[in-house]
């Protein structure tokens, strides 16, 4: 089969270090089947499925289930992220080695949606990870500084009546964990960086030789707390939408490598969990099918990244951080390819109901966005073509 690619951009298949697929436990919002379809349509050939499922992915049985289910669906490589701790409360380290050596070959362990607030627990996790050569992904929130917090702490939140979530809640724990990672000679990955101050901390840690990497979400590159005025929970997310000076700094930090890559934090939620009052609504936004467009809008159209740079932040760096040898790199002649074809000039209008996810909680509803994924190939097989699967 010949794919006509005149005027389009051919990129290595995208790799998402941060996807919530909700299986097992919340199959009413997303399954490995529907989430894989959203990923393929979004240009992804590999995703890392976060551990905050129900039950939590804190043992070999669950991570092997997620891995196998991903292989059966066959649209994208689904790499399960293991939980750092047993269960949601996180008082005891999970058996990272058992998961790393399982059929799922877990490479990333996270507390996302969980809590490794205890510094001794985090220190032991980092020391353990060094021995296993896996990466610990830190959710980047000091939960004892965000009790009851619902929005970025600042003038706007105060005026509108939201309780605050200070930038310091993120920056303090990222600084702490950079120091602990240095102590443990471990690889630390910082999830969803949202503040300018965190970029400062990362720059400082990297300049001192710390093995730290970081991701930014598409929504933190584009959206700001200006959206809080509507009180619409579609805009509620962890960490919260920050200020315009934060988005500007995050874009610059992504362009200069202080932040390594873009990760979606794709977080599907049911209508009843979003269409409710702000304080009761769950945090999170869909992201897999809109990421390329938001990166096109915020990074390419602004001149901050060329398409070579897009390949770096959506594919090469996340593949390196996640230890995926078969993704994010040039292919040899005759080798089955992981590729994404993008029409950089085409535009589309986002409709949550038309996305492949079961949930429809996109913050981009009705927006016209540039950059369209026209084909995705997983090991030489077409997984998505012109907005359709297969
Ligand atoms: C995440 C989710 O829904 O699982 N939500 C989010 O806003 N990012 C969990 C989390 O990271 O808090
Ligand atoms: Zn998180
Ligand atoms: Zn946490
Ligand atoms: Zn998350």
Image: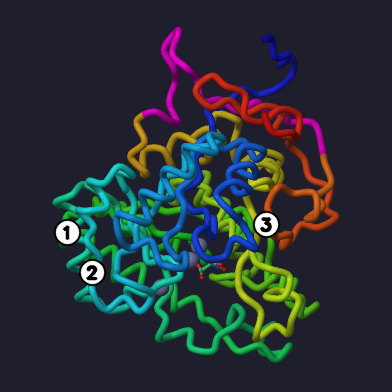
Decide which of tag 3 and tag 2 comes sooner along the chain. 2
Quadrant (top left/top right/bottom left/bottom right) for the N terminus:
top right
Rounded to the nearest whole Å, what is the CA distance between mark 1 and mark 2?
A: 10 Å
Which residue position is annotated with label 3?
222
N-terminal of the two: label 1 or label 2? Answer: 2
Q: Return the mark for residue 43.
A: none
Circle 1 sits on which residue?
A: 128
Dot 3 falls on a residue whose secondary structure is helix
Q: Which residues are magenta?
A: 326-347
Q: Mark 1 packing: few (<14 Cα in 10 Å), some, or many (20+)?
A: some
Q: Nearer the viewer, residue 340 or 175?
A: 340
Could you say where residue 74 lies in the image, as x and y percent from the top left? 53, 34
Q: Secondary structure at mark 1?
A: helix
Tag 3 or tag 1, which sits nearer the N-term?
1
Q: Give the residue at x 54% y 19%.
A: 380
The residue labelled by disc 2 is 93
Above or below for 350 versus 194? above
* Cβ atoms at labels 3 and 2 below 8 Å apart: no
Image height of 158 relative to 8, above or below: below
Considering depth in this image, is 239 or 380 the residue closer to the camera? 380
Q: Residue 321, image x and y in percent? A: 36, 44
Q: Residues within 10 Å of mark 2 (few under 14, many from 20)?
A: some
- Whether residue 31 is in magenta: the answer is no
């Amino acid at each position: 089969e010949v794919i006509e690619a005149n005027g389009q951009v051919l990129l290595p298949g995208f790799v998402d270090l941060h996807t919530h697929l909700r299986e097992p436990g919340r199959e009413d919002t997303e399954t490995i089947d529907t989430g894989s379809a959203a990923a393929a349509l979004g240009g992804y050939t590999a995703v890392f499925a976060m551990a905050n499922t129900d039950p939590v992915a804190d043992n070999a049985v669950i991570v092997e289930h997620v891995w196998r289910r991903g292989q059966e669906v066959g649209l994208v490589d689904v790499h399960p992220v293991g939980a750092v701790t047993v269960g949601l409360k996180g008082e005891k380290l999970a058996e990272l080695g058992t998961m790393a050596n399982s059929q799922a070959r877990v490479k990333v362990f996270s507390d996302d949606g969980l809590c490794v607030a205890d510094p001794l627990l985090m220190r032991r996790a980092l020391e353990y990870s060094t021995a296993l050569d896996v990466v610990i992904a830190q959710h980047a929130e000091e939960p004892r500084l965000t009790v009851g917090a619902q929005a970025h702490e600042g003038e706007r939140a105060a005026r509108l009546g939201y309780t605050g979530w200070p930038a310091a809640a993120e920056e303090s724990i990222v600084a702490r964990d950079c120091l602990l990672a240095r102590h443990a000679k471990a690889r630390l990955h910082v999830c969803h960086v949202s503040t300018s101050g965190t970029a400062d901390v990362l720059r400082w840690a990297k300049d001192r030789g710390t093995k730290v990497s970081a991701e930014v979400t598409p929504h933190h590159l584009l959206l700001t707390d200006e959206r809080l005025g509507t009180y619409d929970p579609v805009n509620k997310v962890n960490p919260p939408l920050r200020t315009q000076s934060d988005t500007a700094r995050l874009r610059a930090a992504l362009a200069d490598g202080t932040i390594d890559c873009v990760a979606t934090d794709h977080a599907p939620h049911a209508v009843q969990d979003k269409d409710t009052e702000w304080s009761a609504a769950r945090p999170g936004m869909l992201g897999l099918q809109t990421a390329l467009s938001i990166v096109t809008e915020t990074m390419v159209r602004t001149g901050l990244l060329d398409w070579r740079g897009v390949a770096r932040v959506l594919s090469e760096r996340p593949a390196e951080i996640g230890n995926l040898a078969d993704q994010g790199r040039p292919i040899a002649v005759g080798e089955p390819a992981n590729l994404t074809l993008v029409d950089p000039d085409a535009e589309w209008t986002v409709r949550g109901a038309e996305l492949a996810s079961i949930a429809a909680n996109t913050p981009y509803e009705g927006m016209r966005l540039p950059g369209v994924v026209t084909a995705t190939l997983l090991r030489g097989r077409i997984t998505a073509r012109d907005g359709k699967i297969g």
